[in-house]
Image (cartoon, rainbow, N blue to C red):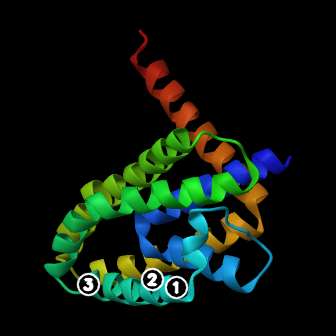
C-alpha cells in the first residue's frame, strides 16, 4: 500500500507542477522541513533547506504576479513551458524516491510527462479559449483558480494520496468512456 500511495503522491504533485511550477516544490519543501509527513532522501532533501524554501517563496510570488498581468501571462506560459515539466520531474522523483524504488530516470520521465501534459493543456487549450471568449477578462480569475488548485492538489497529494488515486481512476475511466462513445458513433 505504501508503494501505491507514494506513486499517487508523485502523480498528484507533478500534475500540480503543470499548473504552477513552484507551488508543489514549496509544499514538499515546507512539509519536509516542518513536519514528519514527508522525509526527502538525498539529493532531494535540498528542497527542505530554509534558503531554498525562501527562494521558492519568491518564485511562487513572481509566477503568481506574472500570470495575472495581461500579455505578460502569455510570455510567462512560454517560459514555463520548460520550467513546469522540469519542476514536475523533480517533484515526482523527490516524492517517489521517499517510499519506492522507482528508477530515478523513470521517475523524472513520468513527472516530466505529467506536468508537461497539464501545462500544455493549460497554456495551449484552456488559456487561449478563455482569452478568446472573454477578451482576456477571464484570465485573472482562471489564474487564481489554477493557483488554488495547484496548492490544494499539492497538499492533498501528500496528506491524502488515496484521494489522488481515486481521482486518477475516475479521470481515466471518463477518458476511456469518451473514447468508447466516440468510437461507437463512428461505427456504422
Q: Is there a contact, CB below 8 Å, between mark 2 and mark 1?
A: yes
Q: Is residue 84 left or right of residue 111?
A: left
Looking at the image, which is closer to me, 32 or 115? 32
Secondary structure at numbered mark 3: helix
Image quadrant assignment for residue 163: bottom right
Q: CA distance from mark 2 to mark 3?
A: 15 Å
Secondary structure at numbered mark 2: helix
Q: Is residue 152 visible?
A: no
Q: Residues within 10 Å of mark 2 (few under 14, many from 20)?
A: many
Q: State the quadrant of the C terminus.
A: top left
- Frontmost of labels 3 and 1 is 1
Q: Residue at x 67, y 58 (%)?
A: 9
The residue tagged 1 is 53
Q: Is residue 123 above or below residue 35?
A: above
- First of labels 3, 1 by sequence position: 1
Q: Residue 149 in the image: x percent, y percent?
A: 53, 73
Image quadrant assignment for residue 71: bottom left
The residue tagged 2 is 56
Q: Residue 10 in the image: x percent, y percent?
A: 62, 55
Q: Residue furthest front?
A: 42
Q: Is residue 22 above or below residue 34?
A: above
Q: Residue 175 in the image: x percent, y percent?
A: 53, 38
Q: Residue furthest top?
A: 188
Looking at the image, which is closer to me, 135 or 160? 160
Q: Is there a contact, CB below 8 Å, between mark 3 and mark 1?
A: no
- Frontmost of labels 2 and 3 is 2
The residue tagged 3 is 66
Q: Residue at x 73, y 53 (%)?
A: 6
Q: CA distance from mark 3 to mark 1?
A: 20 Å
Secondary structure at numbered mark 1: helix
Q: Is residue 140 above or below residue 106?
A: below
Amino acid at each position: 500500500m505504501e508503494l501505491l500511495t507514494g506513486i499517487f503522491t508523485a502523480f498528484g504533485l507533478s500534475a500540480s507542477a503543470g499548473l504552477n511550477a513552484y507551488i508543489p516544490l514549496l509544499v514538499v519543501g515546507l512539509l519536509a522541513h516542518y513536519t514528519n509527513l514527508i522525509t526527502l532522501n538525498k539529493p532531494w532533501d535540498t528542497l527542505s533547506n530554509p534558503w531554498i524554501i525562501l527562494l521558492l517563496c519568491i518564485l511562487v510570488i513572481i509566477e503568481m504576479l506574472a500570470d495575472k498581468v495581461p500579455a505578460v501571462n502569455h510570455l510567462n506560459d512560454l517560459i514555463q513551458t520548460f520550467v513546469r515539466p522540469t519542476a514536475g520531474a523533480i517533484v515526482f522523483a523527490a516524492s517517489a524516491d521517499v517510499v519506492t524504488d522507482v528508477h530515478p530516470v523513470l521517475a523524472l520521465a513520468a513527472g516530466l510527462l505529467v506536468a508537461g501534459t497539464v501545462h500544455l493543456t493549460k497554456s495551449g487549450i484552456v488559456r487561449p479559449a478563455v482569452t478568446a471568449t472573454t477578451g482576456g477578462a477571464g484570465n485573472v480569475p482562471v489564474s487564481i483558480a489554477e493557483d488554488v488548485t495547484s496548492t490544494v492538489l499539492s497538499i492533498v497529494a501528500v496528506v491524502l494520496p488515496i484521494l489522488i488515486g481515486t481521482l486518477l481512476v475516475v479521470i481515466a475511466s471518463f477518458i476511456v468512456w469518451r473514447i468508447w462513445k466516440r468510437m461507437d458513433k463512428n461505427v456504422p
